[in-house]
Image: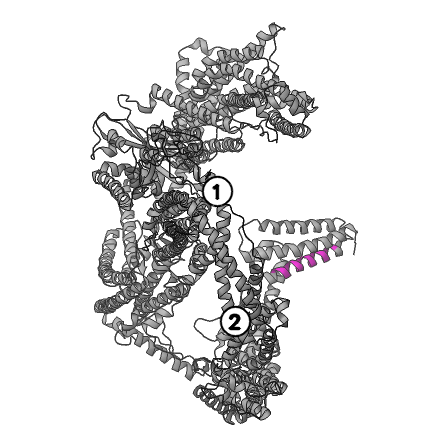
Amino acid sequence: MADNENAAAIDTESPEDTPGAKELDEAPSAKPYTELSPPLISIDSSNDKSGEPDRHRRVGASRLKNSGLGAIRTAASPSTSVSTQGKKTLLFNTEAKKQMMKQAKAAKDERKSQMDSRHSYLISKLADGTGLEETVVQDFIISDEKYHMIDGFFAPNGSKKILFYYQEAAANIELKRLSADTSRSIPQKRLFITNGSAEGLTGDCLFFLRTTNKNISTANVSQEVNFGMLNCSENLLQGLEKLLGNVMVPALRSQENWGSIKEGLKNAQIQEFFESLDKFVGNLTTARKNMERQIILAEVTTAYNIDDLHSPSDYLIAANNTECVEQLEGVLMSWCKQIEQVLAESEQMRKEADDIGPSAELDHWKMKMAKFNSLLDQIKSPQVRRVIGILQVAKSRSLKHWRKLDSNITDAANEGKDNVKYLYTLDKFFGPLAKCTPATMVEHVPNLMNSIRMIHSISKYYNTSAHMTSLFIKVTNQMISTCKKYLCQGVGKIWEHDRQELLKRIKESIQLNLEYQKHFQRIREKLQENPKERQFEFSENYIFGKFDTFCKRLEKLMNVINTMESLSDLQNVKMEGFDKIYLRYQTIITNLKSKTYDVLDHRKQEFDNHYKDFKDQMEGLYQSMQAFMDSWFEQSLTVSGKIMWARQLFRKIDIPMKFLKNNTEILKSPEMKKVIKNYNKMATVLLEFEVLYHRGWCRAVDLARNGLQASLIVRHPETKGILVNFDPAVLELLLEAKYLYKMGLKVPQVALNLWLKEAEIKHHYLSVQELLRNFLNVVNSIPSIIQPLLKPFINQVDDALIPGLTMLSWTSLNIDKFVDNVYISLRELEKVVKQVSDTLECRIENILHEISLTALVDLPEDDPVEVPAFLAMTENIVASAGQALSTQSQQVECSMYQLMDSLKQKLKPTEQANLEDTYACLHLDAKQKTRCQECLPCCYYNLMGHLCQRNVDALVKCTRLSLDALKRHLHVTASQYEAAKPFPSGDVETSTAPFFKSKIVLAIPCVVMRPSLEDIQSVLNRAVNIILSMPKNIPLWAFAHLHLKQQQIEQNAARELGDDSILGKQVVLKSLDKQISEHKDITKVVIQLGSVISILKSDAAKILDNFSPFSHLWNQEPTEKVKEFMASNPILSEFHEQITFYARLESQIDELPSCYEVGSIQFDTQHLKLALIQECRSWKRAFGTALNRKTATEMDEIFSFIENLSKRLSRPINDLDDVRGAMAALKEIRDAEIKIDMTIEPIEETYTLLNKHELLFHDGNAERVDGLAYVWKNLNAQVVQTQTILLKVEPAMKTDLQDGVKSFQTNVQNFYQDYDTKGPGAEGLPPQEASERLQIFQTNFEELWRKFTTYSAGEELFGLPVIDYPDLQRIKRELTLLQKLYGLYNSVIDNVSGYNDILWSELDVEKINNELLDFQNKIRKLPKALKEWQAFNDLKKTIDDFSETCPLLEMMANKAMMSRHWERIAQVTGHTFDVESEQFALKNLTEAPLLQYKEDIEDICISAGKEKDIEAKLKAVINEWSGHVLTFAPFKTRGELLLKGMDITENIALMEDSLMILGSLMSNRYNAPFKPTIQQWVQKLSNTTEIIENWLTVQNLWIYLEAVFVGGDIAKQLPQEAKRFQNIDKSWQKIMQRAHDNTNIVLCCVGDETLAQLLPHLLEQLEMCQKSLTGYLEKKRLLFPRFFFVSDPALLEILGQASDSHTIQAHLLSLFDNVNKVGFNEKNYDQIICFESQEGEKVDLIEPVTAQGNVEVWLGQLLNGVRKTIHTIIRQASTAIADSEIKLYEFQNMFPAQIGLLGIQMIWTKNSEEALNHTRFDKKIMQTTNHTFMDMLNDLIDMTTRELTKMERIKYETLITIHVHQKDIFDDLVRMNIKS
């Protein structure tokens, strides 16, 4: 298009430069409209009359040709160009175009067929990189003219690279220039092959690199070809930086194979290579940031073009323009503000990290230099110079400020440049500072310091104290960072280093600091020697403070490491008990090493605290080691050992003395005399030590010998266990005798004799000890449940052990025989135990264990299960498990009987009594018939009961484990839902797999879950019930029936004893399934499972909320939305936006997680995603259809326009009308040319867009668009031909025109005369005849007007004078007005006549009203001149009459009108109306005098509407109470004998509402037809309300009294009332049975008179019973007044359960102060022996109370007993207080807390009285007593520091509070010096 635009400005051009030629020569494009365009050909023309080449003109250009016809405009198409030889470019026909398209398609197909997996590899990578589909990428590639470069890339020794650019295609420049709405052009990205030099890179560069010169084959393409991508959409520099920094460098660092370099990344050259790479990337980053931070001065925007200034005069002219100068001054001020901001930012204090290095200083100044240099370049630019020049000429005052800023900018730029120059001298040290070790860094420190000194000396700007200090600090920071890196090199934490290596590195780091400071001081001293040089006047503390702090941290670490090194051998100490000390040492070290912070970070103060703790802990460890060694030394020595130690010590001092005895001269010296004296003294002490210990041992020998006279074994007094009775002193005596004898010391004869018998004594000791150990092992190996059964066998062994307890001692001779006898009995016991234990373990315990582990549910491990499948699976598993468990349960029962039979066979006949059938107790309680639990039959009975219960427990455990497992799978602790993988939760810990599988589906209008949470919960509940029903088919054990009989016997015995409490406790044999389902553990789990799914509703709702952003897809109708969208007349870009939006939405939906996990449920979203995607496609289809329809309309318009004009231009030009038609057609083409050119390309883009989104329509439009440009070009060619013809026919046409005008003038005069005399406007004509004349004259006028138009256009065309016809114009206006009047007249007459024929059933009054209103509006709009015509008056009257009748018709058409209302209207009007007839029409009504009786008819119609409302409300009330039913609630176990109170209360409220409605209807004056019915229902509902209220009153009283008179003790004491209540109860049951039979509330209550009569009678009888009961309770309260403390219901419960004394426990707190419960005797059921407080403190009654008989009597006895007991304890406490030796805490422990509190008050009172009585005789007694009270307080406080129970702590805290108060009182007495 750019070439076409240029062609418009060039006179001549070669054929090769024409647009057609360029179109043939340019490369194939991916755009459909260019790819499918037919080629152009050149055809010779012999009609080149002018001899001049036609100029190319752009669309819409025109050229005038002068001729006799005048100025005829000719238009040239933009697609048509003429060469210098007179050639014209024409188009191929449709067949040629189709042929070319076929050839292009064949070329593509050929390329596609030649593709193999190599091309597929490239295409897949390109698709991944661009995000396009592979088919789209393939289309781009095979359409590219450089496709051959791919083959060159694959060839041997081919190109090493191939590049693909993916970026926006160039916009159509010509279209943009012509179109005012550039938004119609849609920017499209193209993918094309390039060599990288022809096109600029503005998007993505995708490249492939080959790594070999060999041929790239299908086998090696993935190995030898590398793919990369460079994103330059922002800028090329950033794209290169990201490619290197984020891709290339990390990939190289992860490389393991480096070819011949074996060391890999450790190689120095490779490390240097990476350093250079990092530096290059850093430079790229710096350069990019500098470019981004550049300050761009504001653009100069003035009306004056300053770029045209060249000479001084130009500047003078601009300076004299005041407006221009003001604008330039504004620009200059904006520049000044920008520069001032830059300068202000450069002077601000830098915010830098604490550990930043010196390289950052260089980067800072480089950035600063780049910023200021950029500003300087802009200041020196020609534009800025021109602005300054103009302002200088104008002598602007703003230049002064500008010059100042210019100077500042220059200084800042010079400073940056100078500082960068000097800092670059340090760049060579930055690398070593960051990479060297501290040891090698020391070598670089001198040169570094000299370079810094040089900068300080000669730098112009950088030598300030602030800059130099900052540089030194950064050097220090770098050294510290390098040291940290060196210390942590190769390890995660420094503790992982070898200790010696770590110490070495620490020392090197400390040495670096010393060297650094030493060289600094050395340079400072040198500078001080020469005062003329600039001195180092910097703060050393500021420079070296961090390094010194870091080194102090390192010194502490050295101390820690040295300590660890010194104690490293502790692990080798093998002394007993020392392992605890070593473990403590390990704990200290581990605790220090486990700190999460960086110990090398000297800013972390936590280490200092932890280091101090470490020192303290190590000090404590050293003390512990010292104490351990001291105690170990003391405990390890015996008597013989101590004597040996004394002798050894003497030997150590004696050896030197023996040596000195041979040197007599030495002994004579004074010093040696002192030594000899000390020697003698020490020898004496050691000898005395030996003698004393030896004598003491000899005296203890007799005591140790007495231990042998004890019995062999003894029974422990408390545990009754049998122990070896051997004195350990005997063994110690034997050991000491042995060693003392060997040492030559005298040993008593007794000890020697024992020593000789040492082996025998030890043998007996060990044999007896082993015997008892074996016996204990055998007894302990007996399972506890069968131990009572084995008592006869254990007693046999006990009998064998009796001689060892009584007769035998350690000196007896028959010990071995005793042991053998015991072993015989023990082996018999062991044999029985083994047999029984094996049976119990293998045949009972194992089976029970298997039963308990039986799974009743199959839980998915990996994949979730469908809900119905889970239920079916559970049913199958439970059925099979139930059969297996039934078999196992019977096996266990059979094994139990076999075990008992085997034991019974080994018993003696006397021991086998009652061990058959019922296992009757040998010592049965005579009264209560309870078992003794001690005899052997009871032991067997208990074993059966235990194993029976174990069997039940195993089944319970089996059920519970299954339910627990189900609960664990279902109960997820995390409340937040998460998407199933892959969903962004990769770092979440692995959790339990979801259990259930559900689906999220679209059920318009909302998204739902199927099955829903309620359905899943319901299925889960059913599965739980199936699991609980598992034991149904498992039979009960025989013991269950045996135990039932025992319970029945005990119950009968209790009943005979008068215990009536068991009357309501019926003994029932429960089935296994009931036992299991009622178990508390099972119930708990079942309750949890009952809501485990339901609690997920909130999380599930959150998931559904995730899809709310897509709700518009289904909540809105695409057709309506598209219709609304189309109403805004959208352009193509808006269609593109909408379709792309839904395409993106489709991608978002496709990327949604395939499933979500909420708790234990996995919700599959595939169905939903498919539905949503389908909805998206529907929306796309809807917009695509609208776009296609809109575009098709435009295309149809263009085709229609072209076809129409083509036909018009094809007509032969024979007369003037033909000329006028041709000229009009040419004008239309010229006017529409730009519009059509601007429409064709968007149409082509439209179908490109539709094809891209696969929106295909089989309507042929996509194929028609290909020929659109073709037919348009044909039309332009036809235009040229028509212009040529017009030039030829010009002379003849002019003559014909003149003749025709003369004839037309004659015809016009004749028409004038006829119109004035015979026209429609003649006076006296009726409207109908005037209308007919109007039609005739209108036809004649139109023919004359057509000729007038033709002749006038001809005159204008040929340049002749245009003749005017004023009368013709007048007649045209008059006819127009008359057409309006008579057209409306005819329309109204026709419509009103048609209304009367409308059937009454089809009448639409609203439509008639609208039409009449429309007619009235049209009448008002008629001109005033027409309102005097008779037609107008007739028209107005007709409309007004019918409009007045319409309101009545509308009211009469109301559906509320009944036959009675029509009869009333007929009576009023005297006219009969057959409304029910099908032929009844509107005319039948209009015949009646409706308007005459208008008011009466309106009143009848209004009453019909009111009556209809009354009827509707009455029906609503009747329907409502036809559906309300009574609801019932169960009462105990007697069935549903109660009305549900909440529901009944609601119904009463509803009745009141209904009565209010009926009341309003009764007062309505229109209720006459319904009044009887209303009165009837008012009575029904009123009576029902009254009966229901009485019913509830009776129900409440019946419930209250039923608990009293049905069972219990009160019924016996009030027999008359009990009998009365029995009759009431029967009547109540009949009432409730009747209510069950007829549940409708109204029918039940008022259907007959039963309830109205019976309920008042029952209420009266119940009140009589209640009155008698109240009197009975008053009598009981008078007998035991404490009954007044409790309410009537509580007292009734006490009296009703009086036969069971244990039921009083719940009411004791109400009757007694802090008596929570009482304790009963275990053997005597009704005997109370103690009482207990709420805090759990028990007090035994002095005299037990028997709780039998009337409850009020024995409660009085209990009250007296409690009082007597408390009085006795208080008396004992008073006696204890009198003992002065008793301790306070002993007193408190002896007595209850209440007595202890009273006791301390008694002590205070007693001591206070004594002190006051004796104060006259003893002046210090008050102070002494006060001190005693203080000591008591301290004792109490000391007790609180001990381990106390909660109750004890409360007691002592209360005692302290009381005693503090007492002490304060006595302190006041002492302070006030009270004497009496």
Crowding around mark 2 (Cα neighbors within 10 Å: few <14, some 14 to 19, many 20+) is some
Q: Quadrant of the C terminus?
A: bottom right
Q: Secondary structure at mark 2?
A: helix
Whether residue 453 is situated above or below residue 750 in the rendered picture: above
Residue drawn 51% across the image and 52% down it: 1352
What colour scheme does the image use? one colour
The residue at which mark 2 appears reads as 1333
The numbered mark at residue 1865 is none
- The amino acid at mark 2 is Arg
Answer whether residue 850 is visible to the viewer in this image.
yes
In the rendered image, residue 998, in percent from the top left (x then y), is placed at 35, 60
Between discs 1 and 2, the one toward the N terminus: 1
In the rendered image, residue 1248, in percent from the top left (x then y), is placed at 36, 46
Whether residue 1287 is situated above or below residue 1196 in the rendered picture: above
- The amino acid at mark 1 is Gly
Please tell me which residue lies in front, 40 or 643.
40
In the rendered image, residue 1755, in percent from the top left (x then y), is placed at 56, 77
Q: Secondary structure at mark 1?
A: loop
Answer whether residue 1161 is visible to the viewer in this image.
no
Crowding around mark 1 (Cα neighbors within 10 Å: few <14, some 14 to 19, many 20+) is some
Whether residue 990 is situated above or below residue 271 in the rendered picture: below
Q: Magenta region: which residues?
A: 1796-1811
Rendering quarter of residue 933 = bottom left
Q: Is residue 1806 magenta?
A: yes
Q: Horizontal placement of 869 versus 1577: left or right?
A: left
Please tell me which residue lies in front, 116 or 1818.
116
Q: Is residue 321 magenta?
A: no
The residue at which mark 1 appears reads as 70
Q: Horizontal placement of 1506 versus 1176: left or right?
A: right
Q: Quadrant of the N terminus?
A: top left
Residue drawn 48% across the image and 47% down it: 1357
In the rendered image, residue 166, in percent from the top left (x then y), is placed at 37, 36
